[in-house]
Image (cartoon, helix red, strand yellow):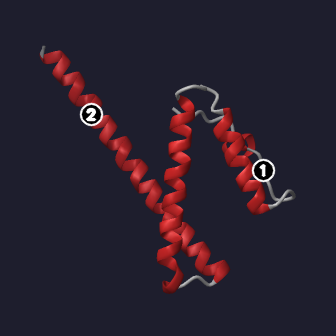
Amino acid sequence: MAKNQYAKALRMARERVSSDRAEIRAQIDMDAACMAANEVFQMGPGRAKAFCEAMMRYAMEIGEMFLEDAKSDVTLEYSKVTLDRRIKEIVGEQNFQPWEVRYGSRVLR
C-alpha cells in the first residue's frame, strides 16, 4: 500500500508542475500579446482589458473545442479545420500557414 501512495504522490507532484508550467506559459503568451498589440496597434489601458478578456475567451473556446473533438476523433480533424478556417480569415490567404506548419508534428494529449 505504501508503494501505491508514493506513486500517487509522485504523479500528483508531476501533474502540479505541469499545470504550473501551463499557467505560466499562458500568462507569458498573454503578456506578449498585450505588448505586441501595444506596439502594432497602439493599444493602451482603454482597450487592454477588453483585449485580454477576448483572448482568454478564445483560448477557452479553442481548448473546449479540441477537448470535445478528442472524444470522437483522435486526429482532431474538425478542430484543426475549424481553427485553420478562422485564422485564414484573419491573416489572409498569403499570410496563412496551415496547422501542420504552425504546430508541426506535435500531438495534443
* Residue 89 coordinates in the image, percent (x, y): 77, 58
Say how many tags the image has. Answer: 2
State the separation of the CA atoms marked 2 and 1: 37 Å
Left or right of 87, for residue 44:
left
Residue plotted at (61% across, 73% down): 36
* Residue 75 coordinates in the image, percent (x, y): 64, 28
* Residue 92 coordinates in the image, percent (x, y): 82, 60
Q: Secondary structure at mark 2?
A: helix
Camera-side residue: 50 or 5? 50
Q: Is residue 102 visible?
A: no
The residue wearing badge 2 is 12
Left or right of 92, for residue 79:
left
**Quadrant hosting residue 40:** bottom right
Vertical order, 80 against 92 (above or below) = above
Q: Earlier in the sequence, mark 2 or mark 1?
A: 2
Residue plotted at (52% across, 28% down): 71
Residue type, numbered disc 1: Gln
Residue plotted at (82% across, 59% down): 95
Residue type, numbered disc 2: Met
* Residue 58 coordinates in the image, percent (x, y): 55, 57
The residue wearing badge 1 is 97
Q: Secondary structure at mark 1?
A: loop
Mark 1 crowd level (few <14, some 14–19, many ≥20, 10 Å Cα) = some
Q: Residues at badges 2 and 1 in contact (C-beta under 8 Å)?
A: no
**Quadrant hosting residue 27:** bottom left
